[in-house]
């Protein structure tokens, strides 16, 4: 199992940047693909970005392409989401999640971190 703790959320003006971190417990972090998801008030949770266990493959929802970058440091058991050129519509609770390699099933979730972008 893996436990996930997000940090780095906050209040930022439109056009600003934030870097989210997701710290994972355990010694098997590199056995998991990692993803970031978000949920805005009154909306369903949506996929934002994913990164493979090695960091070699990444994927993004169209609305964040060119603005957000997902990365990971397996030596530090941490995944990141660098968010630039933030927009008010990026306001949401951001969650990181882990999927055991080969399953494509995000079975482990953090508690979430709030990101608020003011206009």
Image (tube, rainbow, N blue to C red):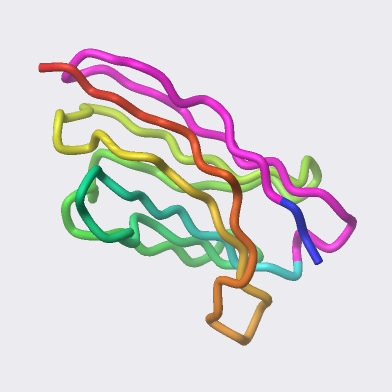
Give the residue displayed 89% in from the left and 57% down from the top.
Answer: 27
x, y percentage for residue 98?
62, 64
Quadrant of the image occupied by residue 102: bottom right
Q: Residue at x 48, y 48 (%)?
A: 95
Q: Work out whether 16 lies above or below 67.
A: above
Please tell me which residue lies in front, 82 or 20: 20
Q: Is 81 left or right of 12, judged from the image as shown?
A: right
Instruction: Give, as a single range, the part of the protein colored magenta.
Output: 4-30
Q: Is residue 83 left or right of residue 1?
A: left
Asked if residue 83 lies left or right of residue 117, the reply is right
Residue 74 % position (x, y): 74, 50
Q: Is residue 28 magenta?
A: yes
Residue furthest bottom as drawn: 102
Q: Tell me: 7 left or right of 100.
A: left
Give residue 56's quadrant in the image: bottom right
- Quadrant placement of the N terminus: bottom right
Q: Position of residue 85 (x, y in %)?
A: 21, 27
């Amino acid at each position: 199992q893996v436990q996930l703790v997000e940090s780095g959320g906050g209040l930022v003006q439109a056009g600003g940047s934030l870097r989210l971190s997701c710290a994972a417990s355990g010694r098997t972090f590199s056995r998991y693909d990692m993803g970031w998801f978000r949920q805005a008030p009154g909306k369903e949770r949506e996929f934002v970005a994913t990164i493979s266990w090695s960091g070699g493959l990444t994927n993004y929802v169209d609305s964040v392409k060119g603005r957000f970058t997902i990365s990971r440091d397996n030596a530090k058991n941490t995944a990141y989401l660098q968010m630039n050129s933030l927009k008010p519509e990026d306001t949401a609770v951001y969650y990181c999640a882990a999927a055991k390699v080969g399953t494509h099933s995000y079975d482990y979730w953090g508690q979430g971190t709030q990101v608020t972008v003011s206009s």
